[in-house]
Amino acid sequence: MSHVELLKQYELKATPQRLCVLGVLEKYGHATLDDIEKYTKVKFPTLSLSTIYRNLNEMLKKDLLSEVKLVNKKDYFEIKKEKHSHLICKECGKIEDYTIQTDELVEQIETLTSNKILSATVSFDIICKECLSTK
Ligand SMILES: [Zn+2]
Ligand SMILES: [Zn+2]
């Protein structure tokens, strides 16, 4: 699906700014507000950080984007997709997606602790294969 169609599906107008933000997220997978500003500046030098932020928020509110909360890291944004976990390289900071089934684990913990689990965010600290190969 093109980004124009994607925005339309979420009832958002396909403005050049939004398309540019989506383009950055598509290319890099996960990006912080600073990253997005850096890359959109190349195409739209006059675009202000607050405009980028407003566009991001609109797309977040519509559930087109999701915020990635990582421990000890800035917030990252990504285009919403199937629920997944993150593998974060401790050396280069790269973030990879990985889909794992947490249902069984959640059930197990609920049974063992008698608590109700509302959501599960699983992330892994890694040394990625590229960093490993340069050692
Ligand atoms: Zn790495
Ligand atoms: Zn992700």
Image (cartoon, grey):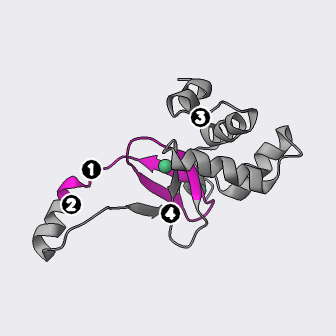
- Give the distance between the C-alpha atoms of the residues marked 1 and 2, in whole angstroms: 8 Å
Residue labelled with disc 1: 101
Total labels: the figure holds 4
Question: Compared with residue 110, is residue 93 higher up or lower down, i.e. above or below?
Answer: above
| Residue at image point 89% right, 46% down | 46
Does residue 15 appear left or right of residue 118 in this picture? right
Foreground: disc 2 or disc 3: 3
Residue labelled with disc 3: 12
- Give the distance between the C-alpha atoms of the residues marked 3 and 1, in whole angstroms: 32 Å
Foreground: disc 3 or disc 1: 3
x and y percent of residue 117 in the render?
24, 66
Pointer 1 local density, CA inside 10 Å: few below 14, some 14–19, many at least 20: few
Give the SS element for disc 3: loop
Question: Compared with residue 14, is residue 130 higher up or lower down, i.e. above or below?
Answer: below
- Give the distance between the C-alpha atoms of the residues marked 1 and 4, in whole angstroms: 19 Å
Amino acid type, label 4: Lys
| Front residue of this view, candidates 8 and 45 | 8
Question: Compared with residue 96, is residue 27 higher up or lower down, i.e. above or below?
Answer: above
Residue labelled with disc 2: 105
Pointer 4 local density, CA inside 10 Å: few below 14, some 14–19, many at least 20: few
Amino acid type, label 3: Leu
Mark closest to the chain's N terminus, 3 or 4: 3
Foreground: disc 1 or disc 4: 4
Foreground: disc 3 or disc 4: 3
Give the SS element for disc 4: loop
Callout 3 touching callout 1 (CB < 8 Å): no
Q: Where does the C terminus fall, quadrant-wise?
A: bottom right
Callout 2 touching callout 3 (CB < 8 Å): no
Callout 1 touching callout 2 (CB < 8 Å): yes
- Give the distance between the C-alpha atoms of the residues marked 2 and 3, in whole angstroms: 37 Å
| Residue at image point 37% right, 61% down | 122
